[in-house]
Image (cartoon, grey):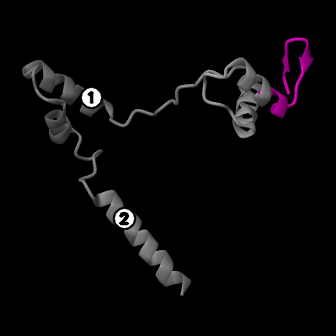
Amino acid sequence: MIGYGDRARTQCEVVRLFRETHPDLPSLNQGTISKIEAQYREMGHVRKVPSKRQAVVDDDTKLNLLLALEENPITPARQLARDNCQKYCKPPGIQSMHSNNKNLISRSNSK
């Protein structure tokens, strides 16, 4: 375990020390300390790292959105998405139907 103060401590000692030092906060368990330590060893810090997402829309769609906003700046975001992002947005319920079909197919193949 990474040292705290003048010496290294076990994870159980860190849990006990945290409970004694901060009785007003919710107590941590050994698993939480283990995850924090693993993240520190891997990254060198324990700050949350924002996940990087890839762009979902192409340049033509971005241009269409900007032009639509330029024509009518008070257009609601939902309407913009409905009008310009059809090939990226699935209608409600489609994803759940596909996942149900996959489950049915895998069940029928396993028999």
In the image, is residue 3 part of the stretch drawn in magenta? yes
Residue 102 position, x and y percent, is 43, 70
Query: Residue, x 8% and y 21% (percent of image)?
Result: 71
Name the disc covering residue 3, or none: none
User: Is disc 1 surrounded by few (<14), some (14 to 19) or many (20+) residues within 10 Å?
Assistant: few
Question: Does residue 87 appear left or right of residue 15 in this picture?
Answer: left
Q: Earlier in the sequence, mark 2 or mark 1?
A: 1
Question: Does residue 23 appear left or right of residue 82 in this picture?
Answer: right
User: Is disc 2 surrounded by few (<14), some (14 to 19) or many (20+) residues within 10 Å?
Assistant: few
Element carrying mark 2? helix
Q: Amino acid at mark 1?
A: Lys
Q: Quadrant of the C terminus?
A: bottom right
Q: Quadrant of the N terminus?
A: top right
Residue farthest to the bottom, as pictured: 111
Q: Amino acid at mark 2?
A: His
- Figure quadrant of residue 60: top left
Query: Residue, x 70% and y 20% (percent of image)?
Result: 45
Front residue of 87 and 80: 80
In the depicted structure, whether residue 8 falls above or below residue 60: above
Q: Which residue in the structure is indicated by mark 1? A: 62
Question: Does residue 74 appear left or right of residue 87 in this picture?
Answer: left
Q: Which residue in the structure is indicated by mark 2? A: 98
Residue 20 position, x and y percent, is 74, 22
Q: CA distance from mark 2 to mark 1?
A: 28 Å
Element carrying mark 1? helix
In the image, is residue 73 part of the stretch drawn in magenta? no
Residue 98 position, x and y percent, is 36, 64
- The segment highlighted magenta reads 1-14
